[in-house]
Image: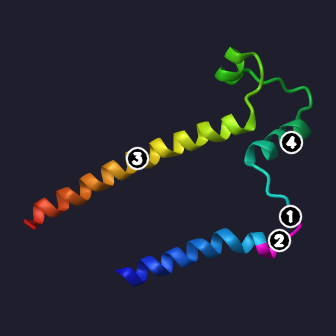
Amino acid sequence: MKKKVIILLVIILLIAFIPLFALKDAEFGGSDDAGSQVVEEVDSSFQPIAEPILEKMLGHELPGEVESLLFCVQSSIGVGVLAFFMGRFVERKKLGKGE
């Protein structure tokens, strides 16, 4: 079991770091930027039908640091929910086996 975990961790690290060293001059942009560029190329007169709620309430665009913070909070909540249910399944499995 430990061997599998170590192998998976090594694979994850390789997947994360190989592109950084293999493609030294590449630009790693987000999917939001790529999508908006494609929409601009296809239809230059496109007008979005909705605005981000916080930007509308504040009257200006959120700083990048705040966006990153909100994304981290969102992902932390998601990980917490997943960990809670995974823990429940593990405990249910243990109780069912009588351990």
Callout 1 amino acid: Ala
Residue drawn where x is 65% and y is 21% of the image: 53
Q: Nearer the viewer, mark 1 or mark 4?
A: 1
Q: Earlier in the sequence, mark 2 or mark 3?
A: 2
Residue drawn where x is 86% and y is 42% of the image: 37
Residues marked 2 and 1 touching at CB (< 8 Å): yes
Residue drawn where x is 68% and y is 24% of the image: 52
| Towards the viewer: 22 or 38 | 22
- Judged from the image, the secondary structure of the residue bearing numbered disc 3 is helix
Q: Earlier in the sequence, mark 1 or mark 4?
A: 1
The image shows residue 50 at horizontal and vertical percentages of: 71, 21
Residue drawn where x is 37% and y is 81% of the image: 2
The image shows residue 22 at horizontal and vertical percentages of: 80, 76
Residue under pointer 3: 80
Query: Mark 1 and mark 4: span between their CA atoms?
Result: 18 Å
Residue under pointer 4: 37
Q: Name the quarter where the N terminus is drawn.
A: bottom left
Q: Name the quarter where the C terminus is drawn.
A: bottom left
Residues marked 3 and 4 touching at CB (< 8 Å): no
Q: Which residues are magenta?
A: 21-26
Query: Mark 2 and mark 3: span between their CA atoms?
Result: 34 Å
Left or right: residue 26 versus residue 81 is right
Q: Nearer the viewer, mark 3 or mark 4?
A: 3
- Determine crowd level at label 3: few under 14, some 14-19, many 20+ residues with C-alpha closer than 10 A: few
